[in-house]
Image (cartoon, rainbow, N blue to C red):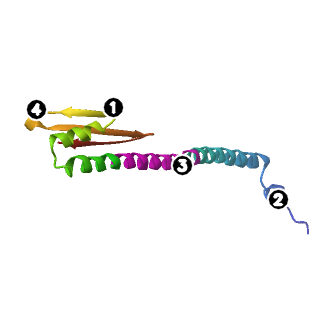
Amino acid sequence: MFMKTDHAAESRNGFTLIEVVFTIVVMAVAAMVIFAYLSTTVSKSSQTIVWTRDLAEAKQDMEKYAARYVEDYLKAGRTSQAWENFKSQVPADPDFEVLESDVANIEAVRVKIIAGDQTLSTVFTR
């Protein structure tokens, strides 16, 4: 009663060294790709906070000019003197410019505020 055993079937119970090495290499490459993606995502996650802060700063500055426009020009009766008073409070800066038009004697002051990467622009008219 001798049983014939198959040695090839007995040796297939585990993994070969090549299969183990190949699996480790594939996992290492996948880990490197995931790590590279996550490292750039984490490093740039603070950028949104900086943009939001810059935009809030620009809005706050713009609200000051809007309040000056209301107080110095609109509530002062929209006179030429009131307009000149408002324009005199706009700083002499390249981001601020006085625009004039020949159509119906329209004059405007364009205010552009730059805070970091954020730019906020508006036009006040007479």
Does the magenta-highlighted stretch encompass residue 29?
A: no
Q: Amino acid at mark 4?
A: Asp
Q: Position of residue 79 (x, y in %)?
A: 15, 44
Q: Which residue is mark 3?
A: 45
Q: Is 73 placed left or right of 37 in the picture? A: left
Q: Which three-letter amino acid code belongs to the residue tagged 3?
A: Ser
Residue at (79, 59) in percent of width and height: 13
Name the residue carrying label 2: 10
Q: CA distance from mark 3 to mark 1?
A: 36 Å
Of residues 106 and 85, the one drawn nearer to the viewer in this rendering: 85
The three-letter amino acid code for the residue at tag 1 is Ala
Give the distance between the C-alpha atoms of the residues marked 4 and 3, in whole angstroms.
49 Å
Q: Position of residue 72 (x, y in %)?
A: 25, 47
Marks 3 and 2, Cα distance to the nearest angstrom?
A: 54 Å
Residue marked by disc 1: 92
Q: Nearer the viewer, mark 3 or mark 1?
A: 1
User: What's the CA distance linking mark 1 and mark 4?
Assistant: 23 Å
Which mark sits nearer the N-terminus, 2 or 4?
2
Closest to the camera, between mark 1 and mark 2, is: 1
Q: Amino acid at mark 2?
A: Glu
Mark 1 / mark 4, whichever is N-terminal: 1
State the SS at label 2.
Answer: helix
Please name the residue that numbered disc 4 is placed on.
102
Stretch of the chain drawn in magenta: 42-62
x and y percentages locating residue 29 in the rendered image: 66, 44
